[in-house]
Image: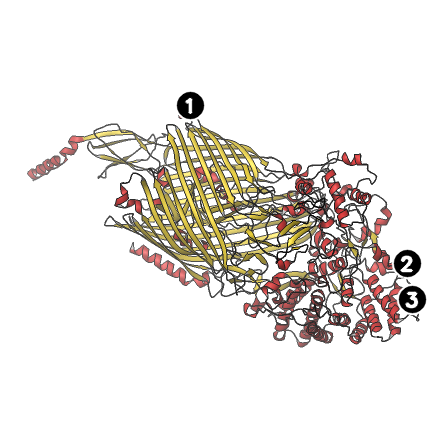
Amino acid sequence: MKYTLGIFLLTTGLFMASCSNLLEVAPRQSIDSSVALSTREGINAAVTNIYVYQKDIALYGRDLLAIAEALGDESRIINRAGGRFINEGQNVINNHLVGWNIYYLGINNINLILEALPNSAFSDAEKASIEGELKFLRALNYHNLSRVYSYDPKVRVAALDKGGVPLVLKGVSSPEQIENPPRASVDEVYVQIYKDLTDAVAKAPTTGAPSRATKAAAMALFARVALYNEDFPNAIKYATDALAAGVGRFVGTPDYVAAWRGNSHPESIFEVLFQTRQESLGVNNSLQSAYTTLESVAQTNSLAALRPTPLPTANGWGAIVPTTAFLGLYPTGDIRRQLYQRGLNRSGSEVEECTKFLGKSGVIYMDNVPVIRISELILIRAEALARSNGNLVQALEDVNRIRMRAGLTALPATTTLAQLETEVTLQRRLELAFEGHRWFDLKRRGRDVVKTTGNVPYGDTRTLAPIPLREIQANRNLVQNFGY
Amino acid sequence: MRKLLLGSWFLSVLFCLPVLAQDVSVSGRVTSSDDGSPLPGVSVQVKGTTRGATTDAQGTYKINAPGNARLIFSFIGYKAQEVAIGNQSQLNIKLENDASDLNEVVVVGYGAAVSKKEATGATANVKGEVIENLPLQSFDRALQGRAAGVQITSSNGTPGGAVQVRIRGVGSISAGNEPLYIVDGVQLNNRNDGGNVSNNPLAFLNPNDIESIDILKDAATAAIYGAQAANGVVLVTTKRGKAGAKARVNVNLYRGTVEPIRQLDVLNTQQWIQVRQEALITTTPTLTPAASRTTVLQSLNLGLDLSDEAIAALPSYNWQGEAYRPGSISNADLSVQGGNDRTTYYVSGAYNKQDAILRNVDFQRFSGKLNLTTKLNNKVTLDAGLTGSNIVQRGPFGGAEGSLAFGAPQYSAPLILPINPIYNPDGSYFGMPASGIVMPGDLSQNVIANSNLIVSKTNVNQLVGNLGLTYAISKDLVFKAFGGLDYRSVNSSFFNDPRLSDVFNVRGSLNQFVNNNTNLTTNGTLNYNHVFGGKHTIGVLLGGEYRQETNETTSLSAQGFPTPELNTANAAAEPVSVGGFWSGFKRAGVFTNVRYEYEKRYILSGILRYDGSSRFGSNNRWGYFPSISAKWNIAEESFLKSSRVVSDLGLRFSIGSTGNDQVNNFAARRLYGLGGVYQGNAGIVVSQLGNPDLRWERNVTYNLGLDYGIFGGRVKGSIDAFERISRDLLLTRSIPQTNGFNSIFENIGEIRNRGLEFDITTINVNKGAFRWETNFNITFLDNKVTKLFDGADVLPGNLTVRVGYPLFTNVGVPYAGVNPANGRPMWYDPSGNLTYLVRTADQRPLGHSGISKQFGGFTNTFTFKGFELSGLLQYDLGRTIQNSQEFRLADNAGALRNSLTYYFDNRWTTPGQITSVPRPANNRTELSGRISSYQSGPRFFQDASYLRLKQVTLSYAVPPAVISRVKLSSVKVYAQAINAFTWTKWTGFDPEFAIEVDASRDNQGIIPQSRSYTFGIQIGL
């Protein structure tokens, strides 16, 4: 008996002594944070994932375009997507652009890579190139955050302005690094975006466009940011530089529609790429389904021949469609009008839908999304020139380039400044419709959103998106937007 | 020498003389008191000597013994009997089954059991026979209403589906709240490893194989399981063999039907058309009635020139009736048991099948069980058990735990516009994509086609085995080595038919996964028991334990099937993705329990466990879990011992601590995980902040209990008051997302559960052949969050968790009904003023919560001769929950979906009308700018309390005289109804469904509870 007890105690003792190892279980689909970014492969994979966030439904995957269109004045919502976008379409309070967490997820991962980069195994040239790429992406995230959640720098309504967004520039990967950042001022946010873009322009690679960040993309984004900041000289400069960078091709009239039927838009200076079948966002979450009932490029092309019957069954929801008033803005003969086609019957309605996103990748519910393309740059330069009363000849030439490509006549040299400004605004609408610009354009000009479902006067609570309530609760330094 | 020899012979004769002179030969037969069957191998011993014999196969024995001696008959599983010979030559003995003794025994963990009188902890016991032959696939569901302090809520009505078990309230927010389940010593993995159907890891065990279930509620006993015991421990003991002359065979057969409890009253086509027109005009007041009528007809694909008469003649189709259908139940099981005094066995095989009330959803199980106990020698006993089962569950589209998928019949059936026929005149499905006809309405999928064509199957193979070796080192000291295995393989496949609209354009899709879980437990215990001086009993248990589990998944998805009949992965043209997953944990611990008893009057017990888990941070891997408990058996005191009124009176007290480690296996680590794919490359992303200080969530439980028995046990029961404080909660603390993370796991916060449990069993009438027995139990529960972190009074991101309020506190902006003047819905703003605008920031507690305040059961059993009628009323009171299903069903054609007639009948139509239902409006909102949608949560809170006639059974046992003629030992026939009646104010399908603190769960798209009727026969051979 003593013997047994002895053995028992001995085994128990051994058992306890070996316990430190006994309880070791290492995960197999995760890496410890301390080693993840210590290799070239680790950093490359982490950089890859920064782009993945841009594909999120809340960002370029869908909402940054679709919800912006629903909020704006060019679309109406057909209730055939189970109520999707209805509230955004009617500007019901609290139904707005989203994505706060995704932007900051991206920013934190960028910050962590930027911190790991100096001690990595890359050459100095490689380090600079990655830094440039990441700074472009950080600037893109901050600019989108800023235009969704805060007023634009030069059109602030002092009484309603609660600041820009929190500026987080240090990576967080362990508990002691957690912070409760307050909102920086809008100007501070823009200063940071300028800084990042300046670095990006200097360091970003020149190859990899349009699905990776390049020098040209950095210049193009700089032009857009400067326009939002009403910093017209920089808008003009960077638009010009970007156009000269040789990335993207200004498509001509004959292939204008075809450009919207291919996988990648030839004008794209930067576009978000969806490549493998598994990246398809599906009927409930894709941009294609939000805009159209049509299934594919092939179906779209063959539809006219089939009409009036028999027509195939509708696929997507086709919930966000252009208003008749908006379609009426296209002058007769405008080639861009061809991008709106009668869709299929769903819930008893068969209407004209935007066909810019059609599963052009060859996989349904999967399209690359142009972030910045040549036409926008031309219009940025035209607007900046016109509004700064600069080189109006150049401005007119830019506007006419867009007009004539669309099959319209050139505006005469006698065009007044006021007419020019109006024309730029109109061409932006006609050219960039359903690409997520109109809502932000109205906002950066401090204009009211006028629509049949009820207007949103500039400065109304609903001009800005609400910061998620959980953020206000989790961070006592964070102030909610006015009225929420 | 001869003299000496002679002398000694003489002496010895003298010595033996009395013996020889009075020795008699005794013979007889030993039978079982249960069924009169002969018992072979019974030991027959002359008391005080080594003389003995054993019974033969017929149960007969023969022994020579002094006429004044006493014989002891002993046999495993039976009460030993001592009989004086009294010069009889024939002694037939009936040995009584030990089961009656077992009744009074409380299993307290690691194979130890103490008599109920000596138990110091709060425990509940449910006998196997009570839950026998219930048409329920897992034993947890059968416990509902039968044990005080134990709240059982079926997640949904899927047969073999998930069940939520909460012992003494909800103590955790982010970590699990499920108790530890131990079957014959094997600690089970009760995590639901997925599948397309609600599945229950406990369904592997045929409930008819269960002998008894013990539930450890307080720390007095549960602390022996240390870090896993915070939510209580459920110990299941399966049936063992009993020795007997012949094997005893038991056959159970039952069949029955299952049917929906309720169908929702939805609008017919005419009502819908009418209210849709009203909704359109509300939103666009300029619309003329004629224009509105045209729009409505157009949206239904009807001719715009349809006359009023033609509209009145339009048909309405009942989608609910087609989706929710009665089904069948059948069960057959056979068990054989027997053995001798060295070896006993129990073997059973069973088949169980039950349909859900939703088309093509069912459960089917084949299971087998073997329990074997054998004495290798006088000191060593081997105990082995093996349960194997194969479960095939067919699941619904969209999952059974709730779904908002338009293709899910359980969600969509009441919402589909009634004008849509289900079938075309030729019997084919209406509205299929290939037909070119689209079903009008938001819900444009033929969900009946989905149900019939989709092949969704979850196949679970599970093996649970235990092997124990007991070595009796001495009379007082026993060593036991134990090993247990719980292996489960889940194979799930979901084939979406290429003819169906979701996958028509990709020509069908297949999702498959295989999940394998291996869970090993091993422990060694040393048990010492000794009585000193007849009064002091000391018991010491020492043990060590190790457990490890690994979990692996491989999955695939593919598209592009040539024909619907070819639905295996190799038929797919396009592989879409593959997946893999691996996880695991290890746990180790040592423990001891020391007991001291004085004359069974005063009992003191202490437990200490030292536990470690791989889940926790390097700084806090190990923790201590102590408990102390005491009992004073007042009835044993001299002043009560002779009382004729009081037969049992005991006062218990315990305090102790237990732990909860039900968090993600790698929650403490700083990690980079897999991200998404871009440009064909896989990305990585910082995925977890880690917390090296992460440790157990700790429960401190106080219990004060009273056990009572009066009038010779005709009235007995117990009363327990408890307080359970869960501190250092394993909480996913929300952090600002600006940090790039949502949350971090920390040990913060505190929840207090207080309660009172009453349990009373009375024999009201016991006269002649008539007997009426009643059991009533009720639990009062008070739950409160007492602390969060950093002085926060609300958990960011989860408004239902707030300091000073119970968990599941309902929040929102209170609904104020409809403005009688214009039919618009109104709410109360924080200062109590009426408003049309709901602001998120104005959400506040509404004064009710989703946690039950009282629950329990009331059982009555009437026996008269062979007849027995028993009924269980089960109740759950005080839950107020949002009836989310009505969120959409209250639209009144605000969208192209059907609505409930209640909302139609009560809608505001005329100025001055007082009602809570706003006027119909397209898209549920009006075009007046800053106005909120009609759909705000607080409109839909309802009292989910219910009282249910859970079970009623009428049985008849055929008298032995009749059945012995056909050589059977017992025959019982019965009829049973489950969920026969429900009394509730809830207006949805059924008020019983599970909600979670940390995840949004509601009643949208769940398969509701069903009602069933079964008829069965139980035959003993």
Q: Front-most of B390 and B915?
A: B915
Q: Which residue is mark 1?
A: B962
What's the CA distance linking mark 2 and mark 3?
14 Å
Q: Which residue is mark 3?
A: A410
Q: Looking at the image, what colour scheme do you see?
A: secondary structure
Q: Residues within 10 Å of mark 2 (few under 14, many from 20)?
A: few
Question: What's the mark number on residue A37?
Answer: none
Q: Is residue B814 visible in this depiction of the protein?
A: yes
Q: Which residue is mark 2?
A: A333
Give amino acid for label 3.
Answer: Ala
Q: Residues within 10 Å of mark 3 (few under 14, many from 20)?
A: some
Q: Quadrant of the N terminus of chain B?
A: top left
Vertical placement of residue B394 versus A73, above or below: above
Vertical placement of residue B111 versus B961, above or below: below
Residue B336 as seen in the image, left or right of residue B650: right
* Extreme residue in the front direction: B912
Q: Quadrant of the C terminus of chain B?
A: top left
Give amino acid for label 2.
Answer: Gly
Of the residues tagged 3 and 1, which is closer to the observer?
A: 3
Mark 1 belongs to which subunit? B
What's the CA distance linking mark 2 and mark 1?
99 Å
Residue A275, quarter of picture: bottom right
Q: Front-most of A257 and A211?
A: A257
Residue B309, quarter of picture: top right
What's the CA distance linking mark 3 and mark 1?
109 Å
Chain-order first, disc 2 or disc 3: 2
Mark 3 belongs to which subunit? A
Q: Is residue B420 visible in this depiction of the protein?
A: no
Q: Residue at x 32, y 58 (%)?
A: A6
Q: Secondary structure at mark 2?
A: loop
